[in-house]
Amino acid sequence: MSKKNWVLLEDLGPRTNWSSIRAKTLQALGKTAEDSIMGGRMDRRRRAGYIEMLDEDLAARVAAELHGYRDKDAEKESRSDLKPWRATVITREEAGVPAPRVRSASGSAEPARRRGGSRGRSRSHSRSRRIRSASSRRSERRRSRSRRR
């Protein structure tokens, strides 16, 4: 059975972002609980946020604190009335997060990725194809016009 250490926040305002969700969560837990938030994500289409907490007790505490929360700042900027947040405790699977990858039995590290993106070009060639700014192109045109006269 999966641990219920995720909190689902629904009915978020249109301008709510991850920083504000994280700040409200820390405010609900107290200042010393910064390392208790493992991670999270936002689903803007559903106006929902998912917060992964360290354990089930913290998740229940956050859900209880944030359930019914009204974002006063967002209500001032919104044209329509916003609903209060709904917070529920859920599992990793309900949050739609895939299970963590299992390491290979050999214990060896994965092969290193190749560096650079030259794709066979030499360094000198890539440097010569520098992008010129609009102002340098203008000054180049002026010089060529003055040569013609």
Image (cartoon, grey):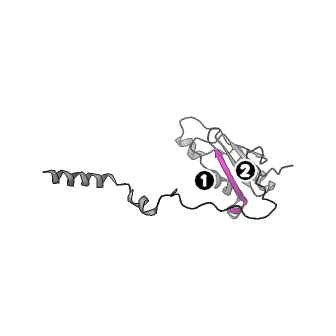
Rendered image: mark on residue 19: 1
Q: Is residue 133 above or below residue 83?
A: below
Rendered image: mark on residue 65: 2
Residue 34, x across and y down, in percent: 68, 62
Residue 95, x across and y down, in percent: 74, 45
SS for callout 1 = helix
Is residue 77 shown in magenta?
A: no
Count neighbours of disc 2 (C-alpha within 10 A) and say few if under 14, some if 14 to 19, many if 20 or more: some
Q: Which residues are magenta?
A: 34-42
Residue 115, x across and y down, in percent: 57, 62
Extreme left residue here? 149
- In screen coordinates, is 2 left or right of 77? right
Of residues 139 and 145, the one drawn nearer to the viewer in this rendering: 145
The three-letter code of the residue at mark 1 reads Ser
Residues at discs 1 and 2 in contact (Cβ within 8 Å): no
Residue drawn at x 54%, y 42% is: 76
Residue drawn at x 62%, y 50% is: 18
What secondary structure characterizes most of the magenta part? strand
Mark 1 and mark 2: Cα distance apart in space: 17 Å
Of residues 87 and 147, the one drawn nearer to the viewer in this rendering: 147
- In screen coordinates, is 12 left or right of 91? left
Is residue 41 shown in magenta?
A: yes
